[in-house]
Image (cartoon, helix red, strand yellow):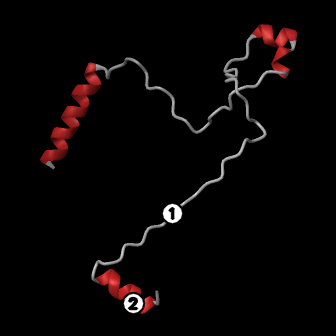
Amino acid sequence: LPERDRAELKRRKLLLEVTLKSFWIRKGSAFSTAVARPETELTPEMISTGSWRRLPFKPYNFSSLGLPPPCGHLHPLLKVRSELRQIFLEMG
């Protein structure tokens, strides 16, 4: 359709444009039917026997955040000090 007619049909909501996507799926170089879990830890036994050289290791994610500490609280005197500071700030 010419652009002018297509715009007119769209304006009257008589035309609906749909985008179709297609993908080709092929076996890659690392394709395998068995699921292999990569190693996550390096043990002293692996180092002494040299087996770590032929094992696949999971890549390390340096940008991930660590877990927060499981416990810990502010000291009671620090809580009192912060409350007093907040009171004086509110008073001006």
For the residue pair 40 and 36, the one nearer the viewer reads as 36
In the image, residue 18 lies at what x, y percent? 44, 68
Res. 8 image quadrant: bottom left
Image height check: is 24 above or below 57?
A: below
- Does dot 2 land on a helix, a strand or a loop? helix
Residue visible at 73% across and 35% down in the picture: 31
Report which residue position mark 1 lands on.
Answer: 20
For the residue pair 61 and 90, the one nearer the viewer reads as 61
Residue visible at 37% across and 72% down in the picture: 16
Q: Calculate the distance from the C-alpha at mark 1 to the C-alpha at mark 2.
A: 22 Å
Image height check: is 88 above or below 19?
A: above
Res. 68 image quadrant: top left
Which amino acid type corresponds to the residue marked 1 in the rendered image? Answer: Leu
Image height check: is 78 above or below 22?
A: above
In the image, residue 12 lies at what x, y percent? 27, 82
For the residue pair 6 and 59, the one nearer the viewer reads as 6
Report which residue position mark 2 lands on.
Answer: 5
Categorize mark 1 by other alpha carbons within 10 Å: few (<14), some (14-19), many (20+): few
Asked whether, in this view, residue 12 is left or right of residue 70, the answer is: left
In the image, residue 55 lies at what x, y percent? 79, 21
Asked whether, in this view, residue 56 is left or right of residue 66, the answer is: right
In the image, residue 26 lies at what x, y percent? 71, 45
Q: How many marks?
A: 2
Which amino acid type corresponds to the residue marked 2 in the rendered image? Answer: Asp
Image height check: is 69 above or below 9?
A: above
Say the numbered circle drawn on residue 51: none
Res. 79 image quadrant: top left
Residue visible at 46% across and 90% down in the picture: 2
Whichever of callouts 1 and 2 sits on the residue coming sooner in the sequence is 2
Residue visible at 51% across and 29% down in the picture: 66
